[in-house]
Image (cartoon, coloured by chain):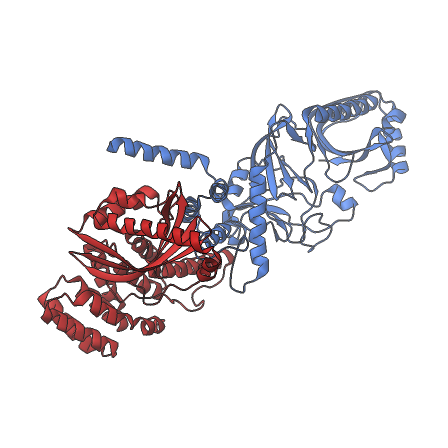
């Protein structure tokens, strides 16, 4: 008999350990409340707080569960005394964001419209849905994204679409992780560590956006998490979540796509867009290799700007001169990645390894291009080293 | 630390009842000492009170009444640690008594130890499901715990937030668990203050009289089953949706009741001057004086039963102390 009990206990622990993130457990508390199992809800929230004593939202729920035994509740977070309302609001919003995310996970067949193609070296891509305060991690399943995890994220106090230094907003765009700062090199404010991203990128600079120091980072030791809108523009995670995210990140490689509200699409539509872009890219390569300079130049938008700041006419003249001087050119592209840019319509960031050989010069580089659709045709708006 | 002065003031009145109900049958010598101790306590003469109660305890060291009284005296003297020891020991020796748990909770709450207070009060109610004082105290403790949780949620300093405690110490030990400790004051009418008389008046005369008789018959039957120590019959008077006093599961409550009914050698329960209030044709409440006598204890207190008519029978849906 005793042995049976012990093994049951062991099983219970095993299940609990495997199943439950703090967020899962909070969700189970709400489930219990909804099912009117209030005692169970209180037991669960007590256990959660034993393990995560800094989970402030859980305290708010505990307060409600206890107060409900004494008097009817008027609202979620029924704090009686006079307190800073914004703090209660922040916790309420966190509760809503977490619950919504738990209860409406994207289904398997829905894909973020932004991830057209991952290159073989990109093991994961991070996609942020600002409205939902959620970061989704997609694995690379033969170039196509497959959802592997998702996390609650805190963004800028003033929301998204950063434009200038100090606006306390989080940028919208396609970025990548540029560094890994371990806990030991940071103050407690950043918690478990930090991963800077490349804001402002070329497109931001072209649009005159400034500011710097947008990181993914953790929280101080006395916190479990922060409200959905609380940072100065950074993407802030619970420390255990940041550690999990750290296991997916490759510095210099992992894309971070920050969207307003993620546009979800189906595999067929994403495939169609990928094929159309790949065809345009291949035509551009072939025309360049064939030294058909006018057709090659036709792939570039009239608004094209290269990194150096030349205008289109000057740049085109330069290209004509360069290409004419070669007796042959051979170009190979590999490790091609393609991401639609959030909020910009038909605008895609394409990057690849370019192996360029010619009668006079051979180079290998990683290149980044921004493609836009003009009158139904994909055109290059920008290119530079990636 | 906060001194719970106010509750004491209103609780003093309870002492007379304590003497009458619990001590009259005691041995004369011991009774004298205890009565004296109570008088001194009432007069605020704590050291004399303590001296007398210690004298009584010398004669009967395990006597619960004396130990309980001593607990109250040292509580008033501000000797919380000693008071906690006394009441804790009482809960161990007499786990069926709700009052020591309640008083333990009051002391814990005065120290800001609300989790401990909560545990003690929950035990008090488990022990004695219709214990109004413990309910009121527990409500206050839950509110306090909630407030602490909110403070943690909002990062507020809760070290000096408001009055620590307004819980009621119970000064009366009623030595038969089946009997409600007579609340010093009727429970505050914060619960649905039903206007029984007005509603009853509207009911047609004749059927009301019949219904009144039916309800009374059920209440008398219930008292009779209890007196016969017929637990099955007694329990059959409780409705399927009976609101168990501690909110515990029905089987757990039934089990406790069976134990309570089985414990004394004899029980006699009388329903005295009942007042029936009908609400519609299927709901009624009956307030009466419950005279309880067993080989262990004699007591008398006010009780209200809420009844519903189901399957043609009046059944108890809720049982409350006081009116």
Q: Nearer the viewer, residue A101 or B228?
A: B228
Residue A180 shows in the view: no
Q: Does residue B48 appear left or right of residue B131 in this picture?
A: left
Q: Tell me residue B103's x, y (percent).
A: 29, 63
Q: Nearer the viewer, residue A210 or A264?
A: A264
Q: Tell me residue A293's x, y (percent).
A: 88, 25
Chain in red?
Answer: B
Position above or below: A121 against B146:
above
Residue A242 shows in the view: yes
Residue sitting at x 13%, y 67%: B57
Farthest residue to the front: give it: B206
Q: Name the quadrant containing residue B175.
A: bottom left
The count of marks equals: 0
Residue sitting at x 40%, y 64%: B188
Position above or below: B246 against A292:
below
Chain in blue?
Answer: A
Q: Tell me residue B275's x, y (percent).
A: 36, 59
> In which quadrant will I find the C terminus of chain A?
top right
Residue sitting at x 32%, y 53%: B129
Q: Does residue B51 appear left or right of residue A14 in this picture?
A: left
Position above or below: A89 against B27:
above
Q: Tell me residue A246's x, y (percent).
A: 54, 39
> In which quadrant will I find the N terminus of chain A?
top left
């Amino acid at each position: 008999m005793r042995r049976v009990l012990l093994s049951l206990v062991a099983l219970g622990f095993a299940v609990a350990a495997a199943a439950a993130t703090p967020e899962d457990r909070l969700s189970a508390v709400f489930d219990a409340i909804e099912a009117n199992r209030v005692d169970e809800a209180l037991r669960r929230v007590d256990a959660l707080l034993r393990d995560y004593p800094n989970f402030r939202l859980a305290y708010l729920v505990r307060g409600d569960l206890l107060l409900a035994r004494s008097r009817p509740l008027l609202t979620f977070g029924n704090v009686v005394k006079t307190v800073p309302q914004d703090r209660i609001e922040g916790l309420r919003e966190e509760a809503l964001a977490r619950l919504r995310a738990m209860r409406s996970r994207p289904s398997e067949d829905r894909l973020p419209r932004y991830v057209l193609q991952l290159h073989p070296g990109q093991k994961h891509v991070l996609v942020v849905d600002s409205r939902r305060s959620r970061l989704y991690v997609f694995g690379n399943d033969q170039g196509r994204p497959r959802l592997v995890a998702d996390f609650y994220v805190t963004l800028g106090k003033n929301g998204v679409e950063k434009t200038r230094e100090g606006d306390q907003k989080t940028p919208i765009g396609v970025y990548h992780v540029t560094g890994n700062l371990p806990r030991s090199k940071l103050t407690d404010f950043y918690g478990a560590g930090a991963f800077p991203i490349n804001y402002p990128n070329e497109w931001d600079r072209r649009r005159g956006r400034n500011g710097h120091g947008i990181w993914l980072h953790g929280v101080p030791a006395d916190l479990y998490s922060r409200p959905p809108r609380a940072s100065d523009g950074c993407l802030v995670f619970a420390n255990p979540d940041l550690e999990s995210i750290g296991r997916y990140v490759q510095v210099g490689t992992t894309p971070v796509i920050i969207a307003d509200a993620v546009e979800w699409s189906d595999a067929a539509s994403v495939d169609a867009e990928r094929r159309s872009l790949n065809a345009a890219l291949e035509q551009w390569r072939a025309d360049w290799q064939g030294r058909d300079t006018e057709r090659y130049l036709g792939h570039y938008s009239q608004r094209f700007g290269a990194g150096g700041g030349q205008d289109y006419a000057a740049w085109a003249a330069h290209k004509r001169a360069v290409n004419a001087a070669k007796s042959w050119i051979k170009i190979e592209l590999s490790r091609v990645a393609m991401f639609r840019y959030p909020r910009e319509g038909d605008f895609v960031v394409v990057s690849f390894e370019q192996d360029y050989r010619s009668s006079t010069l051979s180079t290998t580089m990683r290149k980044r291009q921004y493609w836009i659709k003009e009158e139904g045709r994909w055109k290059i708006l920008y290119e530079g080293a990636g | 630390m906060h001194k719970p002065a106010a509750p004491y003031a209103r609780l003093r009145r309870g002492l007379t009842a304590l003497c009458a109900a619990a001590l009259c049958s005691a041995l004369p010598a011991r009774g004298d000492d205890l009565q004296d101790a109570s008088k001194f306590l009432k007069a605020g003469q704590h050291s004399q009170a303590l001296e007398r109660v210690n004298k009584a305890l010398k004669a009967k060291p395990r006597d619960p009444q004396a130990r309980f009284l001593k607990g109250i005296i040292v509580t008033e003297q501000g000797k919380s640690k000693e008071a906690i020891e006394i009441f804790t020991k009482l809960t161990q020796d007499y786990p069926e008594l709700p009052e020591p748990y309640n008083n333990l909770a009051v002391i814990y709450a005065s120290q800001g130890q609300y989790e401990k207070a909560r545990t003690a009060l929950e035990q008090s109610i488990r022990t004695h499901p219709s214990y109004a004082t413990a309910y009121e105290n527990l409500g206050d403790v839950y509110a306090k715990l909630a407030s602490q949780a909110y403070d943690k949620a909002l990062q507020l300093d809760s070290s000096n937030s408001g009055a620590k405690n307004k819980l009621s110490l119970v000064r009366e030990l009623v030595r038969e668990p089946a009997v409600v400790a007579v609340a010093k004051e009727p429970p505050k009418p914060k619960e649905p203050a039903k206007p029984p008389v007005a509603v009853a008046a509207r009911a047609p005369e004749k059927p009301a009289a019949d219904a009144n008789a039916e309800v009374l018959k059920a209440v008398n039957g219930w008292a009779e089953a209890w007196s016969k120590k017929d637990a099955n019959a007694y329990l059959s008077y409780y409705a399927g949706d009976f609101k168990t006093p501690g909110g515990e599961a029905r089987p757990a409550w039934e089990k406790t009741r069976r134990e309570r009914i089985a414990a004394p050698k004899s029980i006699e329960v009388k329903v005295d001057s009942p007042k029936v209030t009908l609400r519609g044709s299927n709901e009624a409440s009956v307030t009466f004086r419950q005279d309880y006598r067993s080989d262990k204890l004699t007591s008398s207190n006010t009780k209200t039963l809420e009844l519903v008519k189901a399957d043609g029978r009046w059944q108890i849906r809720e049982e409350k102390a006081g009116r």
